[in-house]
């Protein structure tokens, strides 16, 4: 095997497939990158038994061949090279990498032991604009659960129906829903539960194109874009029926300025080091909302924010870390709406625009 490729395109390819490398695996080959050179094309593959990634780039191939090399070592080497032509020359279990005055000789693993890329025939496929999808995933990604005990809550529910794309995530303490209009091909509705970390990583890849194709089988989900294919296990099970959590009306609605509210919350929460609770007192008559926090060790803090109030005065306490996640998700908007039922029922933040966003948050004890 012998080929030459530019350092910049090689670095980009390694950045794409690195998410599929196994970490702390007892099988060394899972921490490797499979490289195959043939007919002017380099193929890179990684596989950690949960996800598989394949990426193709053009190269000057003099001799076809294949090898499996340590992904960590290869990435570290390529990072240090200058942006110039890099030549690879492989023989039995060794790979020589040369760039300008630098030369590296690496031991390789047997490519015959490589599992091979899964050939997946998707039952259903849909194409979606990647930029819009990325914006939506960023809004709900942080709400997915970090607990392994309930895998279904680590996923993001993706549905496309009647030209509306919707993403839903929950960790049982809070719920995030966002939707937007999209021109999708007419036909059967699309529905899948995608692992949250996978969804986020795929859309952040440097090889992402304007449109991403998403396909599903009974047990896998496949993302295809440009010269990249990303296969992941699909989360099995029934996603919680989130619609029953959304009340049809509210007793108090508060229109808030996002920037002013965020700044006030940041100042008040400085005191809430031991207890993440911040109290929100809505004064319907005065058109005000008072934010306050109390800590036995640190003291107290409070700030009043003017706002538009519909309905009755009401008080509620919320975890300010969770509120900040919502504020960050709607930071590009100037206004948002807070809907309240009572001190013991969920608070609902809403923001409408190109992407409509709803964030439901369970209260804490006053």
Image (spheres, rainbow, N blue to C red):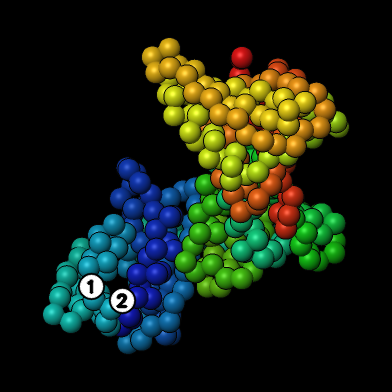
Q: Picture coordinates of residue 336 (x, y %)?
A: 70, 43
Q: Picture coordinates of residue 178 (x, y %)?
A: 70, 47
Please name whichever residue, 284 or 178, is drawn nearer the observer in this view of the structure.
284
Residue at 61% across / 14% down in the picture?
366
Please name whichever residue, 217 or 213, is drawn nearer the observer in this view of the structure.
213
Q: What residue would you read off at disc 2?
A: 7
Give above or below for 109 relative to 234: below
Give above or below for 197 relative to 320: below
What's the CA distance linking mark 1 and mark 2?
Answer: 7 Å
Q: Picture coordinates of residue 247 (x, y %)?
A: 82, 30
Q: Is residue 238 visible?
A: no
Residue at 61% across / 71% down in the picture?
210
Q: Picture coordinates of residue 328 (x, y %)?
A: 56, 45
Secondary structure at badge 2 equals: helix
Q: Residues within 10 Å of mark 1 (few under 14, many from 20)?
A: some
Secondary structure at badge 1 equals: loop
Please name whichever residue, 288 or 58, is drawn nearer the observer in this view of the structure.
288
Residue at the top extreme?
Answer: 296
Q: What residue would you read off at disc 1?
A: 81
In which image quadrant can residue 256 be found?
top right
Residue at 59% across / 61% down in the picture?
223
């Amino acid at each position: 095997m012998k080929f030459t490729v530019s350092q910049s395109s090689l670095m980009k390819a390694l950045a794409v497939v690195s998410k599929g490398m196994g970490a702390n695996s007892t099988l060394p080959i899972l921490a490797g990158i499979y490289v195959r050179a043939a007919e002017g094309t380099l193929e890179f593959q990684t596989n950690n038994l949960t996800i598989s990634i394949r990426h193709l780039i053009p190269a000057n191939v003099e001799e076809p061949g294949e090898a499996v090399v340590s992904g960590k070592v290869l990435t570290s080497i390529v990072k240090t090279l200058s942006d110039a032509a890099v030549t690879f020359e492989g023989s039995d279990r060794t790979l020589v990498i040369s760039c300008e005055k630098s030369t590296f000789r690496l031991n390789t693993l047997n490519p015959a032991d490589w599992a091979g890329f899964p050939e997946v025939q998707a039952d259903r496929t849909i194409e979606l604009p990647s930029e819009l999808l990325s914006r939506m995933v960023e809004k709900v990604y942080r709400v997915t659960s970090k607990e392994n005990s309930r895998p279904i809550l680590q996923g993001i529910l993706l549905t496309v129906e009647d030209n509306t794309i919707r993403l839903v995530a929950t960790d049982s303490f809070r719920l995030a829903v966002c939707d937007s209009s999209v021109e999708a091909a007419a036909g059967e509705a699309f529905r899948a539960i995608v692992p949250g970390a996978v969804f986020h990583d795929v859309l952040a890849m440097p090889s992402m194109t304007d449109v991403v194709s998403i396909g599903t089988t009974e047990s896998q989900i496949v993302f295809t874009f440009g010269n990249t294919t990303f296969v992941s296990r699909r989360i099995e099970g029934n996603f919680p029926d989130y619609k029953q959590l959304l009340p049809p009306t509210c007793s108090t609605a508060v229109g808030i300025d996002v920037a002013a509210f965020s700044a006030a919350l940041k100042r008040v929460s400085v005191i809430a080091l031991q207890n993440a609770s911040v109290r929100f007192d809505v004064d319907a008559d005065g058109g005000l909302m008072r934010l306050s926090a109390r800590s036995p060790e640190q003291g107290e803090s409070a700030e009043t924010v003017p706002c538009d109030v519909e309905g009755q005065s009401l008080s509620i306490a919320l975890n300010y870390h969770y509120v900040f996640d919502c504020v960050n998700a709607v930071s590009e908007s100037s206004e948002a709406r807070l809907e309240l039922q009572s001190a013991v029922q969920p608070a609902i933040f809403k923001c409408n625009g190109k992407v409509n966003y709803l964030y439901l948050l369970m209260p804490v004890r006053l």
